[in-house]
Amino acid sequence: MNPTDQHAAFLQLIQDNKGILFKITNSYCRNRNDREDLMQEVVCQLWKSGQSFDTHRKFSTWMYRIAGIVIGMIYLALLVIAFWYVRTQPVMAISFGVFIVCTVIAIGMYMREIGVIGRISYGDNIIDTQQKLAGIQSSIIWTLRIGWVQLPFWSFFLSVTSCCEKAAGSFG
């Protein structure tokens, strides 16, 4: 397939799945400009990762996986930047460090779940498919548990941020 045909086929796949792409980016960005930037970054990464697409699988599942990786990397970069600012305060740094570790684990588990979903095929044996789905269910439960572990650290940050905003407001 020549490059022009590849480009046209890729654009058609993006067009066919633009609703999914919008749903993914809208769940992370409410601002229209940020959403368009994120959508553009996801589409660029899809284009760059084109050789990893298995044509025997659904494009939408592969697109979810690539979008999850892109969004996860952006989110982790923001967490690292935030950690850089709180590193001088030991309690904040430890709490934020635990929060980052939990987030990395949860994102990794999410990516594993997407990968397992991508490996489910209509031609698979029903027992194999049920085992894969049971593994996904177990993984989702563990991901939720990790989310619950984060709550005390998350609420700590919210309370500290609230106190800082009140203190800054009293000097304004």
Image (cartoon, rainbow, N blue to C red):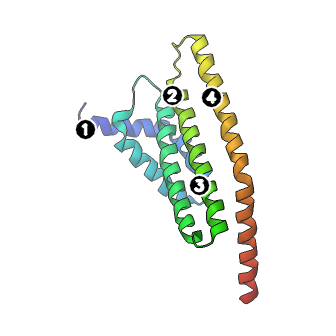
* Mark found first going from the N terminus, 3 or 2: 3
Labelled pair 3, 4 in contact (Cβ < 8 Å): no
| Residue at the image position 70 percent from the left and 58 percent from the top | 154
| Residue at the image position 59 percent from the left and 22 percent from the top | 132
Cα distance in 3D space between marks 3 and 1: 41 Å
Residue 26 or residue 136, whichever sits in front: 136
Which mark lies nearer to you, 3 or 4? 3
Side (left or right) of 108 relative to 5: right
Cα distance in 3D space between marks 3 and 2: 27 Å
Which mark lies nearer to you, 3 or 2? 3
> Mark 2 = which residue?
118
Q: Which residue, as the protein is rendered here, is positioned at the far bottom?
A: 171
* Mark found first going from the N terminus, 3 or 1: 1
Q: Which mark is residue 3?
A: 1
User: Identity of the amino acid at label 1?
Assistant: Pro
* Mark found first going from the N terminus, 2 or 4: 2
User: Percent from the top left, x then y, of residue 39?
Assistant: 49, 51
> Mark 4 = which residue?
136
Count neighbours of disc 2 (C-alpha within 10 A) and say few if under 14, some if 14 to 19, many if 20 or more: some
User: Identity of the amino acid at label 2?
Assistant: Gly
The answer to whether residue 138 shows anywhere in this view is: yes
User: Identity of the amino acid at label 4?
Assistant: Ile
